[in-house]
Image: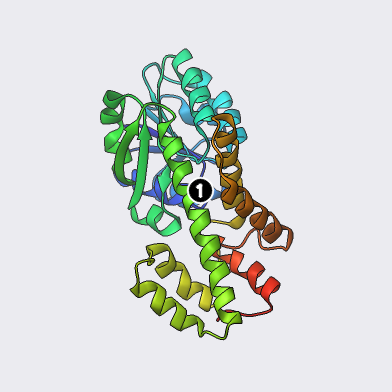
Amino acid sequence: MQVSFLGLGIMGAGMAGNILRKHPLTVWNRTAERCAPLVAAGARAAATPAEAVRGADVVISMLSDPAAVDAVLAAALDSLKPGAIVIDMSTVDPATAHRADAQVRARGGRFLDAPVSGSRQPAADGTLIIMAGGDPATLAEARPVLDCMGRVLHVGAVGQGMAMKLVLNGLGAHMMTGFAALLAFGARQGLAPRAMLEVIGAGAFSSPLYASKGPRMMARDFRPDFTLALMRKDQELVLATAAATGCKLPTLAAIKSVLDEAIASGFGEDDLSGVLQLFEKWDGVVVS
């Protein structure tokens, strides 16, 4: 299948690389230099989204936010081949997915929303969890491409992929912020950080998130797999969707205020685990 991939950020570059191993690939990125490693591996670079989409059987977008999805699809879709499948794998919201679906269908294409669970390394390894919303027959046709990037789960109609991702990201914000807050609290009580990690990892509240992030936090390694700024963006999407659908999420609203403060303190481009630095600042401790 001829595939086009739009957006080569922290996640997109690895995802596109796995597709390239099995399918001819055209890539586009707003910062064109990011295309170079994939071009060296055999992909074709396009100068515009419209050029990238022309002739593709499957078009994948992996972009930063709803505004970027709207803008890139608006620039690309006039070149869409009739019957082509457009798959938005960005983390946006159900409303954005429904807008994209309408735009794609108006141009004779088919649409899936298929955000992912995972960070930089799973994207590179092809082990993401892909939450797909849309027509099952369209998904079956797209699976040879999606399977290159990870495990595909069909979660419902268009928009349900994004809804599932918001559930995951809202939960993840609770987990990461709570983990950081309680590590700082424990350190303030005189507990050894590595002892806390051992006890948490051995008990009922253990999590792969804590197992992967904890040692890096102890080593002061806040290089981003997924930035705090992006985590805050995702919580804005969750809260906006909750407000639009009559749901109350008071704990997430409080977490967003913590993330706002972390970004104001200069930690926005650090890994999401970098929120620890805000609690250290507040509590007067260093967890290491």
**Residue in view at x 44 percent, y 47 percent:** 168
Could you say where residue 139 lies in the image, as x and y percent from the top left? 30, 30
- Badge 1 marks a residue whose secondary structure is helix
Task: In the displayed orientation, state which residue is furthest to the right.
Answer: 264
Taking 253 as reference, is 133 left or right?
Answer: left
- On screen, 60 above or below 269? above
The answer to whether residue 220 of the structure is visible from this angle is no
Question: Residue 51 or 227: which is nearer the viewer?
Answer: 227
**Residue in view at x 44 percent, y 29 percent:** 159
- On screen, 102 above or below 205? above
Taking 130 as reference, is 282 left or right?
Answer: right
**Residue in view at x 50 percent, y 81 percent:** 193
Q: Residues within 10 Å of mark 1 (few under 14, many from 20)?
A: many
- Image-quadrant location for residue 267: bottom right
- Image-quadrant location for residue 110: top left
The C terminus: image quadrant: bottom right
Could you say where residue 102 lies in the image, as x and y percent from the top left? 49, 18
The N terminus: image quadrant: top left
Could you say where residue 176 lies in the image, as x and y percent from the top left? 51, 61
Residue under label 1: 170
Question: Residue 122 or 136: which is nearer the viewer?
Answer: 136
- On screen, 65 above or below 135? below
Question: Residue 186 or 163: which is nearer the viewer?
Answer: 186
- Image-quadrant location for residue 189: bottom right
Could you say where residue 281 lies in the image, as x and y percent from the top left? 69, 73
- On screen, 208 above or below 55? below
**Residue in view at x 37 percent, y 40 percent:** 131
Tag 1: residue type? Gly
Give the image's coloring scheme. Answer: rainbow
The answer to whether residue 121 of the structure is visible from this angle is yes
